[in-house]
Image (cartoon, rainbow, N blue to C red):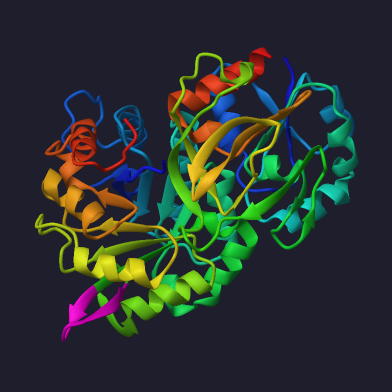
Amino acid sequence: MLTKRIIPCLDIKDGRTVKGINFVNLRDAGDPVELARFYADNGADELVFLDISATEENRKTLIKLVHDVAEQVNIPFTVGGGISSISDVEALLKNGADKVSINTSAVKRPDLINELSLAFGNQCIVVAIDAKQVNEKWKVHLMGGKVLTEVDLFEWAKEVERRGAGEILFTSMDHDGTKGGFANEALEKLGRCVNIPIIASGGAGIVEHFTDTFKYGKADAALAASVFHFKEIDITSLKNELRQQGIEVRL
Amino acid sequence: MQIAIIDYGAGNVKSIEFAFRRLGVETTLTHDRSEVQSADKVIFPGVGEASSAMSKLKQTGLDEIIPKLEQPVLGICLGMQLMCAYSEENNTKGLGIFDVDVVRFSEKVKVPQIGWNTIKNLKSRLFKDIKENEYMYLVHSYYVPLSSDTIASSNYELEYATAIKKDNFYGVQFHPEKSSIGGEQLLKNFIEL
């Protein structure tokens, strides 16, 4: 049976992991390659790398990093941040990325989704959507959440599926950073709008939040950063608990 | 040991190269026909769409070479599907090594299937030291139905073939290069065939 996935997310800046990370056993806590290996060896089902600095110089650093991670890590990984063309994706895949995640560039030019899925297959294209509720409507936001658009979350999700996205990574900005749980109501509705896998993101604080997002949000995967980085939640213990709650996971 | 990875521009082969390197084996990425023919083992990778992948194979004449190979050949993901007779994906005629047609999952399940699923009813030395219900990583919208060539199956909407074998030809739907320890064991077994 297909299992639910647990995905740690690493924010990358200048080739280093940012956000405080607190692993005692790592020589260099900021080294994304070591962190990636640590997660791969400790129960993560996939990894997401988000490049939060997107200058030309950083792009080269990122590509080198993708290469180094791919060399070491035996689970799939997705790279996102500043991707806006076929050649961007080509360079990442050639260096060992398995999937790419696009966000702002897809809203600005939706044809990009069609072009990328035609060139690389839809399994390779994750469309990330950041949204928050404005007057009780879920509105898509751009540029890492800084820019509000008039685009409706659910309409946009249907459109990205039609255009060839293989997966949706939905971050609720209302929940992100709160550690109060995932946006399960919106996730559940999203799951009824599209027939591609949905990754829940934003709001993980305790183990029950993961249980809830799989049970009530019907998410296919759950992504989190700080709860894993700060060792508040250990992935293997989390998965043991999920299994006890009747949720299929890889252990 | 010479392991050739067939290069026909189909998706990401870097991770396969890296996976073999972690096992201490160097591979050669090539579309040179004689290099493919003379290798000890051949990997037939593939991610992406069936019809464009087939036309790329035809451009290099590899479509005629592959079915005649006599050394162990491992088709991965789309590589496995292209070894079959036909694929529903854009009505693509395959290499016909396996007499079975590749079909799409229905809308009853999420398509593509993405993630870790279990494999069972394991047959063949390819699965030596791999336990029943081991997890493997899969990403696909089309699948190979069960047949007499099935050597492993999984369940998604229905029971289907996640590995097939005929003579020297092996195909796996999952990505061993991305399937953690179980996947590594499978590649090791392939090296030792």
* Side of B70 where A93 appears, left or right: left
From the image, which quarter does the N terminus of chain A lie in? top left
From which residue to which does the magenta span run? A132-142
Q: Residue at x 71, y 31 (%)?
A: B149
* Residue A31 percent coordinates (x, y): 31, 35
Is residue B16 visible to the viewer in this orientation of the structure? yes
| A140 part of magenta stretch | yes
Who is closer to the viewer here, A85 or B133? B133
Task: Please say if A52 is above or below B29.
Answer: below
Evaluate whether residue B25 shows in this view: no
Q: Main secondary structure of the magenta part?
A: strand
Left or right: A138 with respect to B137? left
Q: Position of residue A12 (x, y in %)?
A: 32, 49
Rendered view: A90 above or below B7: below
Q: Please state the horizontal and vertical placement of residue A163, each as a whole percent of the image.
A: 53, 72
Confirm whether the magenta stretch covers residue A111: no
